Each structure stands twice: as C-alpha cells, then as structure tokens.
Image (tube, rainbow, N blue to C red):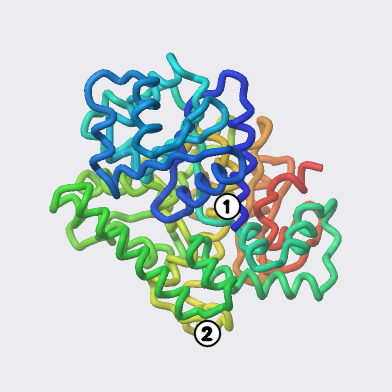
Amino acid sequence: MKRDLYDGLLAWKRQEGRKPLLLRGARQVGKTYLLKEFGRSEFKNTVYLNFEQNRALGEFFSGKLDPRQIIEKLSLYFGVDIRPEAALVIFDEVQECPEALGSLRFFQEEAPEYVLAAAGSLPDLHLNKPTAFPVGKVTFLELHPMTFGEFLEAAGKSGLRRLIAQKPDFEPLESVFHDELMGLLKKYYYVGGMPEAVSKFAAGGNMREVRAVQTDILDAHKHDFRKHTGKAEAVRLARVWESVPAQLARENKKWRFSEVSKHARARDYADAVEWLALAGLVLRCHRARAPRVPLAGYCDEDAYKLYFLDVGLLGARLGLSERTIVSGNDLFVEYHGAFAENFVAQELTAARRAERDRTERLFYWAGNGLAEVDFLVEEEERIYPLEVKAGASAKKKSLITFGDKFAPPALSRATAMNFKRDGAIFNCPLYAVSGFPRLVRR
C-alpha cells in the first residue's frame, strides 16, 4: 500500500551529508513494510536484519564497532554485495540490540557512504545501555497509522483524495461527492489506519477480519507492557490505556487520574502516561494557558486530553460493531464526539509531524470553564483555532468567544457539513481536516 512517508524516504536518500535514518512509530503501523518496499524499489540490494526475530545477529556488533568490518561480515552472512549507494541495510527492532543502534554513530562519522535505515517501536525508551543512543548522528522520521487520505488511496478512491487536496476555496462540493466522502469517513472510523486492517478492508471489506486484526494489535500492546516494564508498572500502564476511551466519552475530556482507579494519584500514574505518549500509543493534547506564539511556551503540563493512536483501535477497544459506527445508531451517539475528536487529533498529528521531531504537540484552549476550543494550530507565527463537531451542529459559542477575546486570523470548525463560509467562520468537512489551516490562510 502507498504511504505518504515514502516521499520523505526519497528526500532522505538524496540528502547531501545524509545520516543514517531512524524510523520511529508504534507497533504495526507499517515501518517494516515501508522500508522493505523502499529498498526493493530504490536499491539494487536490500539487507534486512531483525534483532527481535534473530538475536544472534547482535554478535556482529560485539567488540569494536568498525562500520566497514560490520559491512564485510553482513555481506558474507547474507551473501549480498553491500555497495555504497547501491544497497539499503535495514536494522529492524533495533531497540533489541543497543550495540547496533550505537553503531549508527560510527557509520555516520566513518562510513557515511553506506545507506542505513533503522526502525523500532520504542528505541528511545528501553535501551539496556542508554548511552548507546547516537544523539545527533541520525535523521528521524516518524510513521503513523494511515491517514484518511492514505485510506482513500488503498480503497481505490485516489480521485476523491485529489479532489480534497486541490480544493481552492470553501465553495461546497457537489453533494454526491460530499455524501460519498462522509460514508467513507464512517468506514474509516471503524477500520482505522493500521495497515493490516486497511488491507483486509481493501481486499473485500470483511469487517470481521478487520476487527480480528485490531483485537490482535490491542493484545500485542498489552504484551508489550509486560515485556518492557516491571509487573507493577505494567498494571499501571494497562489501567491508563483502558481508561482512555471512557474518559473520551465525557463532555469534558480533560484527563483525570481519579478515573483511572479509585485511589489513583497523578504522581503514581504520570510515568505511565509519559510511557504511552512516547511509545506513540496515545496522543496527548495539552491545554495552552494563552493562544500565543510559541504555544509550547504557554503549555500547561498538568492539563491535557489523551486520544488513542488510531480511531479504529478505539472502536475495537469499546467493542462497537460496524453497524453501530457506520450506521450511527443510538449506542454510537455517546461516543460520536469522541470519534470525531480522536480522528482530528490523528490527522493533525500525521500532517504536522511526518518529517519533524515528535516533541511538537497538540494544544487546546479552555477559558474559565465557559468555553473550550478543541485544537489550536500554530502556523507561521499565528494561531488558528479549530472546533470539532461530530455532526452538523450550528453551535459556535465557544469559537465566537475565542474570536472576541483573541482576534485570531480565522475561526474554523470541522463538522459533518460541506465546505462553507459563514461570515467570519470557515466550515471544513471532517474528511478534509488534514489540510487545516492551509485553506483558511489563503
């Protein structure tokens, strides 16, 4: 399946003074597939090492880390001529071999002519030897679950994706296109963006198979809690992870430790939230004390909302059926707003972090409990507010309050309605939110 980050890999390959690549992302977002496809299409040879699958490969990195000696050993072992620029060497699950991760530093310093790409789910969290991390010696890229645009490509709807991407204004789309896109968005709410789930859907739309994939992924994440942490910490991680959907269903989605367990305290569970956020399993949206540039300078570290990494996994965790989500029956009403916000959080994260460090954050604004704007986006030293509504609600009190107080360059909503401009307020359909704030800046 086509991934947008492929263009980022091409740009990395062509960089002058190219460093080894470290591709990060949560479990099963498609890191291995993407790197292998990149190697197959762009290089004469590909050498693939998986340090979790074959721990004996770590022996090649014992003793002195001499890049050219390592290349010679790998060439002999795999029977492949590893030539500079002609071969891609992939270190997968590199967090399982700190010495291999550390060797990237020496490849950058002593043998930059070789093309190396490493991938890992948690490489910067669980190293046996933290000092091995090659600080400043690698280029980072981050892979997320497939966006709605990538989902459209996989579903054979690339024309609809182009229609959204090339939209020059807020004139409504023809209703036939808008209705089809909203129908596909509901399916995306169920399928989500985990590549294996999308592949099952694209191959025939069997939703039972999609849900089985999602259940396996959720189980794998729980296994990771036990694998990478101690027993007590694994329990705290599981409690936080399982509390996210219920807290998203509340009107006030601000994260509360008291709802994780009866006697939970912030100091007991803050590390668990940090672990899940760094692992890419939750998306954290911090409250900004004021909508000023830079938003990070006005971040309230203790006030935030948590979203799932993938809206499809959110539905699987809640056990909601295809009929419930796609048809939007009464059972789904309670969670409708949560799905819309979670979707927007995903889209904004993928659009703004694909080629940046993961320290860039999501932000929201709340004013004395009377008004709240779901997302603030910083672009070219200006702050753009975005309110999210799951349906076609015309309510905009919070947005108007924000506008009166701070006079932003534009006021915007993401809703189920078509493109529309209502005075000073721009309505962006949920399916087009990845382009925010591009349209309103024109």
Mark 1 or mark 2: which is in front? 2
- Asked whether 81 or 305 is in front, the reply is 81
* 151 lies left or right of 93: right
At 28% from the left and 54% from the top, the residue drawn is 257
Q: CA distance from mark 1 to mark 2?
A: 30 Å
Specify the label residue 179 is tagged with.
none
Give the labeled residue for mark 1.
373
* 152 lies left or right of 126: right
- Asked whether 348 or 7 is in front, the reply is 7
Residue 301 in the image: above or below residue 281: above
- Asked whether 390 or 238 is in front, the reply is 238
Q: Looking at the rendering, which quadrant does residue 208 occupy?
A: bottom left
**Quadrant in which the N terminus appears:** bottom right
Point out residue 359 in the picture as x, y percentages from the top left corner: 46, 35
Q: Looking at the rendering, which quadrant does residue 101 occupy?
A: top left
Q: Earlier in the sequence, mark 1 or mark 2?
A: 2
Specify the label residue 323 is tagged with.
2
At 65% from the left and 68% from the top, the residue drawn is 155
Residue 318 in the image: above or below residue 331: above
Residue 297 showing in the rendered view: no
Dot 2: what SS? helix
Point out residue 219 in the picture as x, y percentages from the top left corner: 30, 65
Q: Residue furthest left?
A: 231
At 22% from the left and 21% from the top, the residue drawn is 63
Residue 205 showing in the rendered view: yes
Point out residue 388 in the picture as x, y percentages from the top left corner: 60, 60
Dot 1: what SS? strand
The 10 Å Cα crowd at callout 2, few under 14, some 14 to 19, many 20 or more, is few
